[in-house]
Amino acid sequence: MTWLPKSVVCLSYYDRFRFRSDAFAALVLTLQTFPLAIAIAVATGVPPIYGVLCAAIAGLLASVFGDSKIRVTAPNVVFVAVASSIVAREGILALSLSTLSAGVLLVFFGAIGLGAGIRMLPRPVVVGFSTGIAVLVVSQQVPALLGIGSQIVADPVPRAALMLIRYPGQIEPHAIILVFSTLILITACRRARYIPTSLVAITTGALLVKFGHFPVYTIESLFGSDLMSFRIHLAGAFRLDLLGSILAQGFAIAVLVATESYQAMGLAAKLTGERFNSNGELFVQGGVNVACAFAGGLPTSGVSSHTFDNARLGAQTPIAGILQAVFLVVSLLLMAPLFRFIPMPVISVLILSSVFSMTNWKEVLQLIQVPRIEAAAWVATSLLTIVTDLPIAIAVGMLIGMFLYIRKKPAILTKAAPGTSHNP
């Protein structure tokens, strides 16, 4: 099949009306996603500038070369658990190399035609990954939510439990005030279409710290005051001792990128009626992650919530994604002076809000009512994701998925083709 990006197709009928719709959708969506890009970067353990730059690069490349009019590609909260673990154990260089290897693997998967195979992963397994990752990310945010600490650690679940048991007296009241205020703001404005709630939250929090002198941990507490310096970490020396870990983490990231991107593309197809090439999407997302490896190292994928908002705001073509990349860079330059004052409790609330929108809780409730074997697959995948390294959980989860798929398709193995005789 000849590959023709949607950005090229749409140019044949592009007009002033579509440009206005795309520009408006891009501006409003930028105001909503800009704070989340900062929050994902900080929760991962890298400076906020890397999150914004990766979001801009991913949005630009995926829109220019992608196979969808409205799908949005950006840093995804689903990667926070694996990416923060890599940074805590081995540093930003290892994260950049892992993202690079994930991009190369995705291109390879697309070249050998694995797109359809990855799309056939059973839902209990995919939801199991999401559920386990949600538990890990929520546990990671507990210290910052309570104002106890801001350090990113590799094993968030034991640390969160330990802090709740041993340090309840060290909870910072100002952090609790910020958490509840942000939650109320997000809940009250959830149905508002054009209000950038997250941007209002981080701006208000930063102003309270700067002028109200709230004694809480901030982004500056984690990274220092020089938050706008940029370094290409892949320019550092390659460490052979990291090779095994990098390949394993890269494989896990690649599988998550593929599953999340297919969900976003499926939503876009449902909203617009367009069709997409599974292997082509792997090529695009692979190339995007290779580029992001040189811009801070954050993994990126198609994001269903951003894609839905993009359509809801009236985006017509991939030009909206290109304009969003421009607006993200402009927002970075305008908001940079406030970065160091942004409170960690507010960052944590934004991450939790994104986690709860990421996980399809209705689907989780439905899994309780499915046949026992599928419910067991969901439970097993969730527990593996929580208690083991993510590459191991991904590998075992894919084996479970293969078992469920074969079990559901016995006709493939036992029935002869139509029109032929069956010999026992």
Image (tube, rainbow, N blue to C red):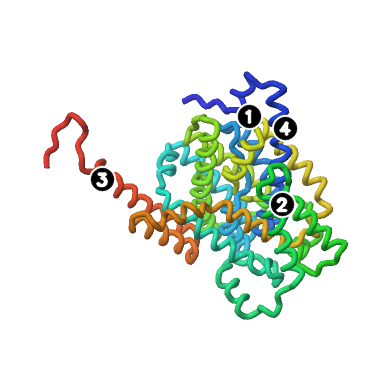
Q: Secondary structure at mark 1?
A: loop
Q: In percent of the image, x 60 and y 79: which residue is there?
A: 165
Of residues 376 and 388, the one drawn nearer to the viewer in this rendering: 376
Q: Which residue is mark 2?
A: 198
Tag in front: 2 or 3: 2
Q: Is residue 363 above or below residue 275?
A: below
Of residues 398 and 251, the one drawn nearer to the viewer in this rendering: 398
CA–CA distance between discs 1 and 4?
10 Å
CA–CA distance between discs 2 and 1?
25 Å
Tag in front: 2 or 1: 2
Residue type, mark 3 in image: Pro
Q: Which residue is mark 3?
A: 410
Measured as percent of width and height from the top left, residue 181 is found at 73, 61
Q: Earlier in the sequence, mark 2 or mark 3?
A: 2
Residue type, mark 1 in image: Thr
Q: Earlier in the sequence, mark 1 or mark 4?
A: 4
Q: Is residue 143 above or below residue 137?
A: below
Measured as percent of width and height from the top left, residue 393 is found at 45, 59
**Residue 23, numbered circle:** 4
| Residue 136 relative to residue 15: left or right | left
Q: Are marks 2 and 1 in contact (CB under 8 Å)?
A: no
Q: Residues within 10 Å of mark 1 (few under 14, many from 20)?
A: many
Of residues 174 and 400, the one drawn nearer to the viewer in this rendering: 174
Q: Residues within 10 Å of mark 4 (few under 14, many from 20)?
A: many
Q: Secondary structure at mark 2?
A: helix
Q: In percent of the image, x 62 and y 52: which residue is there?
A: 96
Residue type, mark 2 in image: Ser
